[in-house]
Image (cartoon, helix red, strand yellow):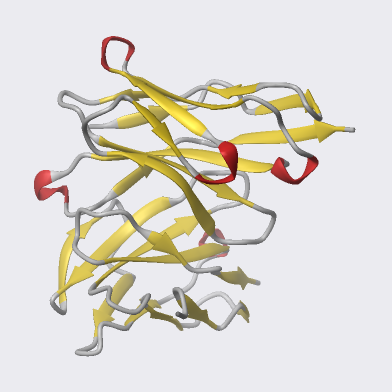
Amino acid sequence: DAGVTQSPTHLIKTRGQQVTLRCSPKSGHDTVSWYQQALGQGPQFIFQYYEEEERQRGNFPDRFSGHQFPNYSSELNVNALLLGDSALYLCASSSKPNTEAFFGQGTRLTVV
Amino acid sequence: AQSVTQPDIHITVSEGASLELRCNYSYGATPYLFWYVQSPGQGLQLLLKYFSGDTLVQGIKGFEAEFKRSQSSFNLRKPSVHWSDAAEYFCAVNAGGTSYGKLTFGQGTILTVHP
């Protein structure tokens, strides 16, 4: 049983560019959440998708957007990248919004 | 707003010694509580969770945690630490209800294990 898979594993982008990160949830899971983890910090909640809708959003600007597809996979898009967007981006999936979450290995984004 | 505090940024123990990592949360009701472990550059692995019921919960890798409502705490314990337990540990809270599964994490505690 594949767990949560994220792609790519590493990414280097230039300031001002746009990036798309992808996540496939664990089999049987229908809810996907995204987190940003800066170096030396705990993960910060970006948003959660359930039934293809954004259900809740953390304190992140509109440059951060997402999408959930009918097969429950999800994308995180970040526009107009800033140096401060450099972080490990984690995707988590669960079988319903309020059950335990399983995390992927993350995408390490470096903005130069 | 809910918050999670892990008072110890870095803890060092000897292999075979006991371990307790502290976690305090701030929230009006009893939230769902979790402990995750993260190896360098990796994702988070769920160690254990508390939703309701018995306040002492058992997890994987020999870890346990005790929920104390009066102290708003959910401390992680292990009776005998192994070198492979060296990692960063995160306590997390889910307020439940309309929070739709949003996890609020503490800052993490880095565990170093000496041989």
User: Please, which residue is most extreme toward the bottom here?
Assistant: A70
For residue A13, above or below residue B29: below
Residue B88 coordinates in the image, percent (x, y) = 63, 42
Q: Quadrant of residue A95?
A: bottom left
Indicate left or right for B14 with A81 as reference: right
For residue A52, above or below residue B111: below
Front residue of A91 and B58: B58
User: Please, which residue is most extreme toward the left here?
Assistant: B98
Quadrant where the C terminus of chain A is found in the figure = bottom right
**Residue that appears at 45% across and 35% down:** B106
User: Please, which residue is most extreme toward the right here?
Assistant: B115
Residue A84 coordinates in the image, percent (x, y) = 54, 58
Front residue of B103 and A15: B103
Indicate left or right for B30 with B58 as reference: left
**Residue that appears at 39% across and 32% down:** B57
Residue A81 coordinates in the image, percent (x, y) = 48, 72
Residue A91 coordinates in the image, percent (x, y) = 41, 67
**Residue that appears at 23% across and 88% down:** A69
Total tally of numbered discs in the picture: 0
Q: Quadrant of residue B41?
A: bottom right
Q: Quadrant of residue B95?
A: top left
For residue B111, above or below residue A55: above
Quadrant where the N terminus of chain A is found in the figure = bottom left
**Residue that appears at 51% across and 22% down:** B22
